[in-house]
């Protein structure tokens, strides 16, 4: 049985163009799909970002922008639009890129892929419509027994079905590429990362179906009861695993960017791929992070799952944390930046937003999102921060400074390579990752700070002025919320510039034609640079060793500080 | 484009590499492990919560 | 490059960078340590959340809490009973729209069996400024032993979104230092 009989003969006569920069053969149908998904992603980022700003300004006690009802509505909308719609549309674009484009292959069943796209759009609009109607301010987690309008769940289900179609297209394209021998040997590392993301996506979407379909029926009155604890368990198999799709996708983008901009190659294929393999096996277990403060679950279940099976998936991330900067250092040293320990880093293309976005993402994901995530996900330590603002602080470190910033950086590659447009306002674009990165790091850190001081998440009024039994947080907490508000303005500004540059470029950017020199050049030897084994044996990597040592020391210190803090708590068992 | 060095036909592809090259085996593992360790085990924990006395 | 297939057909046999090897070793051992430490804390630590839980109809739980409050009520505050259970007693806490009920008066250094549940939506039990945070569910009665280690006035806020009044949901726990009080009394008596 060939792929054709499985997938149908659609798209057999695909139309290709050859990329003048990378030499890759690009299926035009795939290219259009990538464009559509990327544009949709940016639109939802715009909506979600504005909502995020309004949420942050409301949580700034001195500003307190929105009334309570609007605040909870905006927060629900913010979560759904950025976490689900922006990220997943972009990821579908990444999947199509990593399969069809990187494998020189036609995309499987483009019509079917468009069906998936339309379902995702309809679903996203339907959920937004339900949220705006005001009777679905249940937060994007929608814990029962609190109930949203049926359209809220239906929209999410349609969106998920569309995304699942995207994954099927991805796997089918891999099958075609193999059968038609469009590449030889193993798939490229970036594609392997995308495979990791897609595998996790399948588990994610299946779990989502298992829990959201009954919940939808319940909202229609067809099922009488949804058990809240059971819901939370299965919901997070989806909710947290989406974050693991993000991690796999943005790590792939780190490798992609390092390769295209600097000619970097993994230190060793074996190590980097095994790190992704650890993700495939264990990353999704971390869904248990959300059930550490719940009754009825045994500690053995909590420990095995929350530790991603003895931290083997964390090991994967720590390996990428070494191999990505390591590969960059090796490439830069080969490019001639060999002076001292850090010339390779100082002379890196910091003015290229694709690079700065990628590198900031790498550093901040590790230091802010990664370390706080492991601490938060430690069985006993969780009780210190569960449901406080520390949680949004942590995941803005992962999904905003990590994923979103990596995707933003990646966009500056997609615009010239896929949209074939010259980036308009390159000066503004240069600034953008820094502005957004600093702002996003700020909101992450200050929300973590506020959470450490006990400030609850999803909360309209930390002065508790309407509460019958008075309570107020410390002055430090108020300070944190103010600093969070200021950082939010910076992040929103950086986000706005991103949207403007992308939309402007897509609409008005100069068409790139043959022989064109890019404003933000790619590594000149891009198409040719291949060595026998990765960068192995080529050079010493003192800079990377220093960076990784700083990281490790911070990690260990922060971990033990939290145990110290825990040991001073009231006793409970 | 990468030009492959000719592989002597006697050289076998190592097992681990074959596993990592087998997308659908990976898909199977990536779905089964969390389904068993997280979902099934977790659901069993929850359904075995006793009724209040 | 990471965007092209590996050049060697058989890349699994390639040698690994020394720095990679060392880092893998360090990271692996650190992971093992963190894994082991969670287990160890169950034996050496004083802060481990109990899994003990029971299914219970919310109305039944409500009745239990009301009986508890009636039995040990010592006064009232803003219409909410202040309840002072004896040392070692079962203590019931109820989350509902939008209050933590009743107000408790506990003793420092004394252990209580705390029962925690809700009767409508999920709520988040968040003891402040101590910062102990536990999720509470309708239909599930969570039981754990709690020993206050400091005296004073503590707030309970709700940190699980529970509707439009979420930010008005509070409660209170007083912790008295009995020994300190006795010492003070003796001092006064002696004077
Ligand atoms: C302009 C940039 C952003 C700002 C200023 C911002 C700010 C905030 C704030 C203040 C909260 C509320 C925390 C709370 O009250 O519990 C929040 C929640 C959240 N944010 Fe963002 N954020 C931004 C971008 C993003 C992005 C890009 C993502 C995802 C990719 C994201 C994902 C989330 C999620 C999932 C929540 C939780 C919603 C919930 O609790 O239901 N944010 N954000
Ligand atoms: Cu509540
Ligand atoms: Cu609440």
Image (spheres, coloured by chain):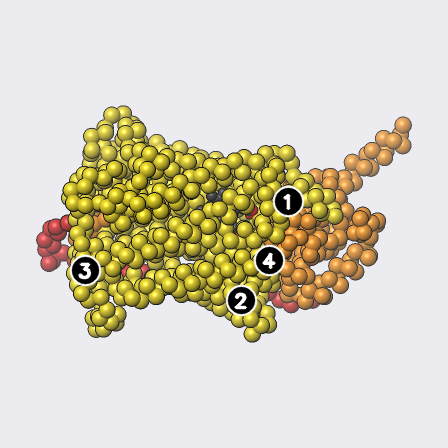
Chain colours: A yellow, B red, C orange
The structure residue drawn at horizontal position 79% and vertical position 60%, both measured from the top left corner, is: C67
Label 4 to label 2: alpha-carbon separation? 29 Å
Q: Earlier in the sequence, mark 2 or mark 3?
A: 3
Residue designated by label 2 = A150
Residue A408 can be seen in this image: yes
Give how far across and how far down residue C119 sits, in percent: 68, 61
* Element under disc 3: loop
- Asked if the residues shown at circle 1 and circle 3 are in contact, with their CB atoms under 8 angstroms apart, the answer is no
Label 3 belongs to which residue?
A15
Q: Chain of mark 2?
A: A
- Label 3 resides on the chain identified as A
Q: What residue appears at the point 54 percent right and 63 percent down from the top-left corner?
A: A231
Q: Are marks 2 and 1 in contact (CB under 8 Å)?
A: no
Is residue A47 shown above or below B53?
above
Mark 4 / mark 2, whichever is N-terminal: 2
Task: Report how far apart the C-alphas of labels 4 and 3 lie in the structure.
Answer: 57 Å
Question: Is disc 4 in the same subunit as disc 3?
Answer: yes
Residue in the picture at 55% in, 64% down: A149
Task: Please report whichever mark, 1 or 3, sits nearer to the chain's N-terminal start.
Answer: 3
**Separation of disc 2 and disc 3 at Cα?**
42 Å
Frontmost of labels 4 and 2 is: 2
Tell me whether the residue at label 2 lies in contact with that at label 3, contact meaning CB atoms closer than 8 angstroms.
Answer: no
* Residue A461 circle label: 1
**Number of callouts:** 4
């Amino acid at each position: 049985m060939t792929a054709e009989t499985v997938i149908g003969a659609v798209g057999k006569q695909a139309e290709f163009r050859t990329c003048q920069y990378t030499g890759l053969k690009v299926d035009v149908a795939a290219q259009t799909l990538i464009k559509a998904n990327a544009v949709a992603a940016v639109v939802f980022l715009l909506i979600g970002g504005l909502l995020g700003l309004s949420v942050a300004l409301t949580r700034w006690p001195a500003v307190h922008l929105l009334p309570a009802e609007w605040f909870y509505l905006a927060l629900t909308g913010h979560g759904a639009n950025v976490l689900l719609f922006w990220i997943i549309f972009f990821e579908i674009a990444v999947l199509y890129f990593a399969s069809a484009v990187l494998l020189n292959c036609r995309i499987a069943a483009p019509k079917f892929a468009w069906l998936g796209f339309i379902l995702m759009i309809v679903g996203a609009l339907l959920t937004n419509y339900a949220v705006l109607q005001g009777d679905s301010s249940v937060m994007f987690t929608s814990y029962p027994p609190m109930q949203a309008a049926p359209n809220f769940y239906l929209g999410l289900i349609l969106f998920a079905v569309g995304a699942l179609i995207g994954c099927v297209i991805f796997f089918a394209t891999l099958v075609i590429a193999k059968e038609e021998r469009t590449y030889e040997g193993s798939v490229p590392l970036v594609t392997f990362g995308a495979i990791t993301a897609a595998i996790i996506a399948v588990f994610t979407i299946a779990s989502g179906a298992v829990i959201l379909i009954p919940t939808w029926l319940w909202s229609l009155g067809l099922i009488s009861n949804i058990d809240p604890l059971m819901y939370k368990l299965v919901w997070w198999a989806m909710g947290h695993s989406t974050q693991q799709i993000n991690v796999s996708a943005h790590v792939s983008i780190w490798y992609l960017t390092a390769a295209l901009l600097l000619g970097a190659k993994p230190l060793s294929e074996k190590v980097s791929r095994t790190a992704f393999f650890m993700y495939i096996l264990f990353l999704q277990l971390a869904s248990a992070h959300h059930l550490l403060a719940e009754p009825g679950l045994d500690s053995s279940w909590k420990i095995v799952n929350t530790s991603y099976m003895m931290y083997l998936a964390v090991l994967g991330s720590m390996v990428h944390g070494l191999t990505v900067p390591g590969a960059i250092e090796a490439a830069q040293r080969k490019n001639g930046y060999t002076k001292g320990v850090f010339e390779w880093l100082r002379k890196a293309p910091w003015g290229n937003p694709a690079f700065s976005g990628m590198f900031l993402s790498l550093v901040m994901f590790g230091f802010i999102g990664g370390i706080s995530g492991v601490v938060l996900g430690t069985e006993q330590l969780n009780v210190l921060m569960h449901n406080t603002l520390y949680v949004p602080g942590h995941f803005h470190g992962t999904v905003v400074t990590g994923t979103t910033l990596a995707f933003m950086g990646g966009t500056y590659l997609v615009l010239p390579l896929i949209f074939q447009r010259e980036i308009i306002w390159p000066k503004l674009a240069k600034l953008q990752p820094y502005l957004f990165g600093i702002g996003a790091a700020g909101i992450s850190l200050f929300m973590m700070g506020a959470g450490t001081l006990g400030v609850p998440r999803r909360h309209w009024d930390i002065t508790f002025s309407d509460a019958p039994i008075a309570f107020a947080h410390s002055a430090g907490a108020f300070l944190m919320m103010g600093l969070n508000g200021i950082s939010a303005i910076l992040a929103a500004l950086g986000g706005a510039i991103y949207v403007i540059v992308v939309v402007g470029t897509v609409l008005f950017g100069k068409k790139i034609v043959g022989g064109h020199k890019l404003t933000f050049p790619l590594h000149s030897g891009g198409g040719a640079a291949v060595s026998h084994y990765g960068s192995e044996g080529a050079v010493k990597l003192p800079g990377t060793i220093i960076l990784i040592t700083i990281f490790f020391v911070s990690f260990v210190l922060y971990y033990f500080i939290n145990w110290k803090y825990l040991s001073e708590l009231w006793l409970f068992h | 484009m990468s030009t492959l060095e000719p592989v002597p036909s006697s050289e076998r592809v190592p097992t681990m590499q074959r596993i990592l090259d087998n997308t659908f085996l990976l898909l199977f593992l990536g779905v089964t492990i969390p389904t068993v360790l997280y979902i099934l085990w977790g659901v069993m924990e929850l359904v075995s919560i006793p009724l209040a006395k | 490059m990471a965007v092209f297939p590996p050049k060697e057909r058989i890349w699994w046999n390639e040698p690994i960078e020394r720095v990679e090897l060392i880092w893998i070793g360090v990271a692996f051992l650190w992971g093992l340590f963190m894994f082991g430490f969670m287990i160890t804390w169950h034996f050496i630590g004083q802060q481990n959340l109990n899994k003990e839980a029971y299914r219970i109809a919310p109305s039944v739980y409500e009745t239990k809490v009301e009986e508890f409050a009636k039995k040990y009520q010592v006064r009232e505050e803003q219409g909410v009973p202040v309840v002072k259970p004896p040392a070692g007693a079962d203590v019931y806490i109820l989350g509902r729209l939008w209050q933590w009920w009743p107000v408790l008066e506990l003793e420092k250094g004394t252990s209580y069996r705390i029962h925690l549940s809700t009767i409508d939506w999920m709520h988040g039990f968040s003891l402040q400024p101590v910062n102990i945070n536990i999720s509470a569910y309708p239909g599930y009665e969570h039981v754990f032993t709690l020993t206050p280690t400091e005296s004073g006035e503590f707030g309970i806020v709700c940190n699980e979104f529970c509707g439009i009044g979420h930010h008005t949901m509070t409660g209170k726990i007083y912790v008295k230092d009995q020994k300190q009080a006795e010492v003070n009394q003796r001092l006064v008596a002696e004077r």
